[in-house]
């Protein structure tokens, strides 16, 4: 036979259960409303990198090995169907290794670069050492051969006179329409960071241009 104390305990348990359940429902509803409620009167800082001036930025930190693998995967795809062959080795510096088709033959090419991050997020590869087989040629002349005979993506420019390569990272054609900028590169500490800029329109979010 149940006592009054047992009935009271059971009633209190039901009240706690119902209260907790109601609290969870309220939390879920609040979260759904927060996500889907239309945003108004929100001003975003202008971003000169996209026409609407509305985007989100993310800093992605990675390693030399990851960039090395990604770069060479891109190079393999870029050179597919050609007779050209070169690759990058990123360690204490950026080492370009390959073959250069000159003088009706191919000669082993080796160039070591120091990466220098530009204020606009691009990258300059400043030549530190260079060799073309056993030929004793001026560095600038070998850079001219590299510019003439080695295929490069359109956003990569070889500057023989300055003995450097300009890598316009911000001009890369990325299918997702994201924009990439180099944030920092410290090869000695294996610290590489990139800024990923995601325009809202890429995510299907319509936004009116901000008045300047």
Image: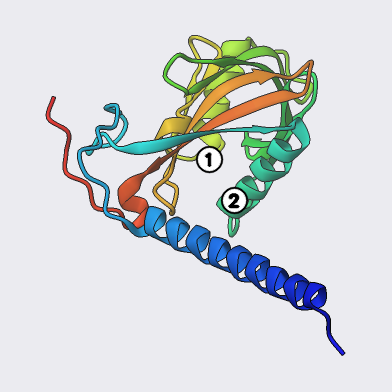
CA separation, marks 1 and 2? Answer: 8 Å
- SS class, disc 1: loop
Give residue 178's position: percent from left, percent from top. Answer: 43, 44
17 with respect to 172 (left or right): right
What residue lies at 66% left-to-right and 65% top-to-bottom? 16
Give the residue at mark 1: 151
Q: Which quadrant of the rendered structure holds the N terminus?
A: bottom right
Q: Quadrant of the C terminus?
A: top left
Say which residue appears at 33% left-offset and 47% top-offset: 200
Which image quarter: residue 105? Answer: top right
On residue 79, which mark appears?
2
Please tell me how many numbered marks the rendered image carries. 2
What SS does tag 2 mark? loop
Residue occupying image coordinates x 52% and y 66%: 25
Toward the right, the furthest residue is 1
Question: In this orientation, which residue lies closer to the viewer: 164 or 150?
Answer: 164
Report which quarter residue 184 is drawn in: top right
- For the residues bearing labels 1 and 2, Cβ distance under 8 angstroms: yes
Tell me which residue sits at (57%, 63%) in the image.
24
Relative to residue 23, is residue 5 depicted above or below? Answer: below
Q: Which mark is residue 42?
A: none
- Side of 93 where 118 appears, left or right: left
Give the colouring mode of the picture: rainbow
Left or right of 2, for residue 50: left
Residue 65: percent from the left, percent from the top?
A: 77, 36
- Looking at the picture, tell me which residue is in the foreground, 33 or 181: 33
In depth, the one of 33 and 61 nearer the eye is: 33
| Residue 79 percent location from the top left of the image | 59, 51
């Amino acid at each position: 036979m149940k006592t009054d104390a047992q009935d009271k305990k059971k009633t209190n348990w039901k009240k706690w259960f119902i209260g907790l359940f109601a609290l969870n429902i309220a939390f879920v509803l609040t979260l759904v409303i927060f996500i889907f409620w239309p945003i108004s009167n929100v001003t975003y800082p202008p971003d000169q990198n996209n026409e609407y001036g509305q985007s989100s930025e993310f800093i992605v930190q990675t390693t030399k090995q990851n960039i090395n693998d990604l770069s060479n995967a891109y190079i393999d795809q870029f050179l597919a169907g050609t007779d050209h062959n070169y690759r990058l080795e990123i360690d204490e510096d950026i080492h370009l290794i390959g073959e250069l088709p000159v003088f009706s033959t191919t000669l082993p090419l080796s160039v070591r670069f120091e990466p220098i991050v530009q204020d606009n997020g691009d990258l300059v590869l400043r030549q530190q050492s260079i060799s073309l087989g056993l030929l004793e040629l001026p560095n600038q002349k070998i850079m001219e051969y590299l510019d003439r005979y080695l295929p490069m993506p359109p956003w990569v420019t070889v500057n023989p006179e300055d003995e450097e390569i300009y890598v316009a990272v911000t001009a890369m054609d990325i299918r997702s329409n994201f924009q990439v900028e180099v944030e920092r590169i410290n090869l000695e500490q294996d610290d590489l960071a990139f800024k990923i800029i995601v325009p809202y329109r890429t995510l299907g979010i319509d936004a009116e241009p901000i008045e300047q």
